[in-house]
């Protein structure tokens, strides 16, 4: 229990000395349990020094000023106080979230601009984290990396926001790099899309000159120089969120499906007339033996499900390619240049599996599923066979040796694939294709 | 060298060792430690007085010194006195030995 007198019962000198103790401790991260005793000990020191100075002939106020001067300022002592109770890591992270040192009116002009940029980028980063965590657009490993990178960046931005108030040099360096980075990003964006002008780049143009000015340099002049480690952390916090997404496209993700998880069989049945093949059907069986690795996003991975879109612009599609004489689409099976299945069912349940639209073929590639029509997470059950049937009629009878050959390929985000090529009367199992070729537009009309 | 003497150049370990050395002589409180440090070193070690308290807290946390409150006369704030623990005595002995070895090495280079 502290022996501090109640306010108003202190002498004038005691009030001055207690105020100095409060300034020091307010800027230190001293645990509440230790604060009162430490305050009393610091006050006792100041009081004794004050009394000695009074005894030496100083008046009350001058003696208090000497005692405080000899003791050291709050800025000088607070970091040491914090480190006495916490690790250096704590002192340089949570410790900087303590109240401001300098009254708002004494802050330089560049300070406000710098903090505005930090605050705004932090806000956008926080929103991005929430959106990505909620919508889970990436595959699990990618999502975890993306979230980790942005969470680290957000933490650094928030710390810098407070640290700048506490006149710490590293925070100013972070602002300078951030301003330069948003300007650079804005220039790149402008080059790629000449009609787009980045708001952040414009903001960066306002902030950078002020952040690099003499006034702000003086503002942080008394703080510690930035170490290599802190410099790297600053660079990582600013640059990584910009480069993470494009780089992640090349990060292999072991938590998504592989070719071993999908079995495919393609069966081609032809109808024969007196002059050869007149038409027939292509039956495509797809069976995923597990779906727990298919979903994207860490939460999706836990709860299961499947989605085949990825905002990196890569999707999982099945391509049905055709080599052979021209044919006509049966009634109702032509969708633009696409080819719709006459039926698509869950072979185990007999239920229509096309309700999720994932068998709709809406492009010249005859895709089963596409970026615009992704596989519905709720439509896939592990171990079930999904059977799509595609009918065709040739424009004129064709000898069997010239009859159609169909190539069906499931392309999983251009990372792996399963492919089967079947002609009339053949049932062919799909084979793993490690590097599926990009699908090329192919006209069905020779 | 600052106006205060050899303050900023003193490492945390050296400062702690000096405090152990003083407290090892007899039980002392913070103000007394600062005064003794200044007097014993003839003002060479003259840090801001408040810096002794984080150092005392660290040494106490590490179990090298133990503190206790002592009531004073009416109107005088009570004081927290520190004494060396057994672990502190050992740390002081080791630290002193290392310092003497370093001093001998430095003397052999710089000339004594």
Image (cartoon, coloured by chain):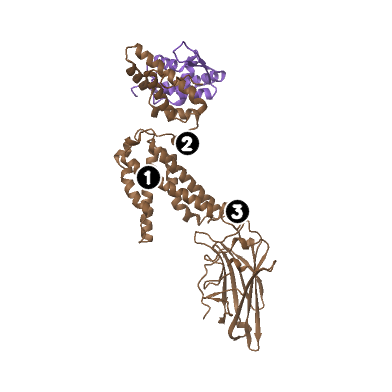
Chain colours: A brown, B purple
Classify mark 3: residues with Cα within 10 Å, few (<14), some (14-19) or many (20+).
many
Q: In the displayed structure, would residue B5 be above or below residue A90?
A: above
Label 2, on which residue?
Answer: A94
Q: Quadrant of residue A376?
A: bottom right
Q: Position of residue A267 (x, y in %)?
A: 65, 74
Gap in Å between the C-alphas at discs 2 and 3? 33 Å
The residue positioned farthest toward the right in the image shown:
A348
Task: Looking at the picture, tell me which residue is in the foreground, A333 or A219.
Answer: A333
Q: Could you confirm whether marks 2 and 3 are on the same chain?
A: yes
On the question of residue B59 being in view, the answer is yes
Query: Which element type, helix, strand or loop, lies under badge 2?
Result: helix
Number of marks drawn: 3
Q: Is label 3 or label 1 in front?
A: 1
Q: Position of residue B99 (x, y in %)?
A: 47, 21
Q: In the displayed structure, would residue A32 be above or below residue A44?
A: below
| Residue at image point 48% right, 45% down | A152
Classify mark 2: residues with Cα within 10 Å, few (<14), some (14-19) or many (20+).
few
Label 3, on which residue?
Answer: A301
Q: Could you confirm whether marks 3 and 1 are on the same chain?
A: yes
Q: Are the residues at dot 3 and dot 1 in contact (C-beta closer than 8 Å)?
A: no
Who comes first in sequence, dot 2 or dot 3?
A: 2
Q: Position of residue B23 (x, y in %)?
A: 49, 16
| Subunit ID for the residue under disc 3 | A
Q: Which mark is residue A116?
A: 1
């Amino acid at each position: 229990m502290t022996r501090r007198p109640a306010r108003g019962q202190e002498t004038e000198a005691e009030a001055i000395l207690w105020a100095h103790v409060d300034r020091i401790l307010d800027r230190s991260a001293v645990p509440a349990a230790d604060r009162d005793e430490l305050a009393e000990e610091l006050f006792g020191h100041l009081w004794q020094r004050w009394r000695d100075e009074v005894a030496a002939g100083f008046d009350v106020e001058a003696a208090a000023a000497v005692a405080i001067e000899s003791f050291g300022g709050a800025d000088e002592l607070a970091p040491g106080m914090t480190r006495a109770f916490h690790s250096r890591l704590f002192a340089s992270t949570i410790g900087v979230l303590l109240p401001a040192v300098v009254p708002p009116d004494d802050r330089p002009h560049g300070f406000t601009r710098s903090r505005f940029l930090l605050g705004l980028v932090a806000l956008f980063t926080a929103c991005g984290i929430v959106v990505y965590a909620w919508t889970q657009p990436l595959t699990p490993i990618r999502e975890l990396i993306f979230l980790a990178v942005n969470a680290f960046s957000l933490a650094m931005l928030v710390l810098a926001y407070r640290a700048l108030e506490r006149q710490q040099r590293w925070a100013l360096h972070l602002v300078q790099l951030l301003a330069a980075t948003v300007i650079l990003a804005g220039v790149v964006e402008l080059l790629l899309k000449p009609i787009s002008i980045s708001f952040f780049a414009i903001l960066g143009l306002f902030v950078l000159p002020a952040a690099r000015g003499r006034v702000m340099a003086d503002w942080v002049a008394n703080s510690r120089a930035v170490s290599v480690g802190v410099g790297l952390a600053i660079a990582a916090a600013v640059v990584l969120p910009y480069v993470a997404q494009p780089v992640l496209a090349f990060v292999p993700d072991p938590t998504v499906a592989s070719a071993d998880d999908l079995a495919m069989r393609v069966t081609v049945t032809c109808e024969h007339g007196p002059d050869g093949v007149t038409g027939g059907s292509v039956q495509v069986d797809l069976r995923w033996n597990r779906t727990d690795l298919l979903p994207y996003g860490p939460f999706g991975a836990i709860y299961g499900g499947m989605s085949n879109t990825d905002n990196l612009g890569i999707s999982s599609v099945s391509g049905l390619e055709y080599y052979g004489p021209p044919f006509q689409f049966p009634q109702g099976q032509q969708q633009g240049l696409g080819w719709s299945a006459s039926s698509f069912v869950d072979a185990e349940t007999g239920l229509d599996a096309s309700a999720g639209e994932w068998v709709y073929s809406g492009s010249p590639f005859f895709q089963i599923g596409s970026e615009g029509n992704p596989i519905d997470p709720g439509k896939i059950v592990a171990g079930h066979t999904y059977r799509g049937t595609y009918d065709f009629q040739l424009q004129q009878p064709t000898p069997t040796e010239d009859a159609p050959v169909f190539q069906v390929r499931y392309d999983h985000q251009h990372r792996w694939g399963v492919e089967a090529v079947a002609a009339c009367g053949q049932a062919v199992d799909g084979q793993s294709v490690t590097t599926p070729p990009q699908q090329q537009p192919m006209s069905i009309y020779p | 060298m600052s106006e205060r003497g050899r303050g900023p150049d003193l490492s945390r370990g050296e400062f702690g060792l000096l405090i152990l050395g003083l407290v090892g002589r007899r039980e002392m409180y913070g103000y007394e430690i600062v005064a003794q440090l200044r007097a014993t070193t003839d003002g060479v070690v003259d840090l801001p007085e408040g810096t002794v308290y984080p150092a005392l807290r660290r040494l106490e946390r590490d179990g090298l010194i133990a503190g206790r409150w002592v009531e004073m006369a009416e109107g005088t704030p009570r004081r927290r006195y520190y004494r060396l623990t057994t672990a502190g005595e050992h740390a002081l002995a080791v630290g002193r030995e290392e310092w003497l070895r370093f001093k001998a090495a430095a003397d052999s280079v710089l000339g004594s």
